[in-house]
Image (tube, rainbow, N blue to C red):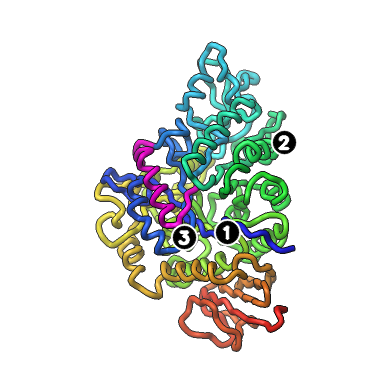
Amino acid sequence: MEEQKKWWKEAVVYQIYPRSFKDSNGDGIGDLRGILEKLDYLSYLGIDVIWMSPIFQSPNHDNGYDISDYQGIMDEFGTMEDFRLLLKESHKRGIKIILDLVVNHTSDEHPWFIKSREEKENPYWDYYIWKPAKNGKEPNNWGAWFGGSAWEYDENRKKYYFHQFSPHQPDLNWKNPKVREEIFAMMRWWLEQGIDGFRMDVINMISKTEDYSDGALKGLYGDLSPYCMNGPQVHEYLREMHEKVLCRYDIMTIGEAMEAGVEEAKKYAGAARKELNMVFQLEHLDMGRGQYGKWNDKPVNLKELKEIFGKWQEELKGTGWNSLCWSNHDQPRAVSRFGDDGTYWEASAKMLATCLHMMRGTPFIYQGEEIGMTNAGFQKLEDYRDVESLQAYQELVEEAGVSHGAMMEYLKLKSRDNARTPMQWNEERQAGFTEGSPWIPVIGSYPEINVHKQRSEESSILNYYRRLIALRREKPVIVYGDFHMLLKESESVFAYERKLDGVKLTVVCNFTTQETPCGLVSETASILISNYQDRASGILRPYEAVVYEEQCKGGRL
């Protein structure tokens, strides 16, 4: 069956973390005017869509993912007039904007929650999830994702409220139809402003089971995942959202779906299901979990990585559409985790880009990825800002017995702050991000790794990304071609084929520092793109990536 063409399948998305992108007024915090200043840069890169992490009013206990006003702009970021100007100027350049929809929870400073926690019964009492104490303690043993109990006692109501993340992020009660109508009205309001869609934060967590029994112990607390992920009414809620909001606009919708497998993704993103365009599958980003979840130093297992990508590429075909990413605001830097941020920094950054952008799906570039920004490497705990990282340190070092040294190494590898350091624009003070003092330290690599330097170097990582994006526009096989994984048992080479209308691409990527024999290295096929300047003979060099193109007369391969 021929793939139905859609603009959002052909697009390349660039994620901006506004706090760290560009500061226009010297207060050390990135803002909307800063993004406006860099629109021509994004046009130069060639992207089609900007996804901005939350820009709404927030007390910033979780950097904007705790929203106190869905229809107001965060004071540090600017005004609604700034946003409208940014939207207008983006559209002038052919760049669409999607916003981060955070509706599993709000801030505890949102007016709904302030009213919900009042002692006297009122219409907002059931906008959130409240439960009485059980045997004088929390309603159950569930642990929050950021550490500690998932329940917080409120003196006014003499009950506990539920929060999957920070106590400052109470979960909304989606079973209440009034809550859903409030959310849908807000979504329509933003779409009428002219935005082009939503990335939906932890959207597969909005429906909870009625069983609030204890979860299996996972560290110090019980696991809430089976009770809160892909819940019994989540698809009913999303179909209602589609009917009342999404189907009325030609937009892009992506749902973050933690721990959702392919079969579940087919429900969220199946073309006939009328829910979402696609989901963010995080299975490859959640690899290597251990006793303390992600907090460990396990290396990436390439065979497992290939199995995950291959499964999603091949099993979603004909039903749904893939999103493609190596990192985001919640993940370490791609080149530090999956590549080599030392000797082979440049080659491995280009290799990772090649491997991802040639697959079937919509690619997402996280800010700084296109210049090979690396993990922060902070030496001091006080340099970290992330609530998850700081709570994990407290819980694991002070309560679980992990050593300070070990935890600092885990933070260097896995902290969300690795992705949140300021964008490195040039070699000037504070990397050109701000004229003031940045909210989080600029990392020391900026004199060598920055946009200004790479724009002038034809062979830079930045200009390599530009070529990949341009090829996507030129070659329909990259967007719509069939996918077939090759060399599945190889522990060093990630290889696959793409085929469409008599065109075949063979993509071979070496994920190691060693030269690797590879029977797929062709002496006759033309090279579409490669991260080395010359052609090898029968081998792949360290972190080498090559895309071969072959044509077949008669349209068959």
* Disc 2 residue type (three-letter): Pro
Q: Quadrant of the C terminus?
A: bottom right
Q: Position of residue 391 (x, y in %)?
A: 48, 39
Residue 536 visible, this orientation:
yes
Please say if 131 is above or below 406: above
Marks 2, 1: nearer the viewer: 1
Q: Position of residue 19 (x, y in %)?
A: 38, 46
Task: Please report the residue visible at 45 percent of the width from the left and 31 percent of the height from the top.
Answer: 69
* Disc 3 residue type (three-letter): Ile
Please say if 144 is above or below 53: above
Secondary structure beneath dot 1 equals strand
Secondary structure beneath dot 3 equals loop
Q: Quadrant of the N terminus?
A: bottom right
Q: Is residue 373 magenta?
A: no
Kindly identify which numbered label has been placed on residue 362.
Answer: 1
Q: Earlier in the sequence, mark 3 or mark 2?
A: 3
Q: Which residues are magenta?
A: 74-98
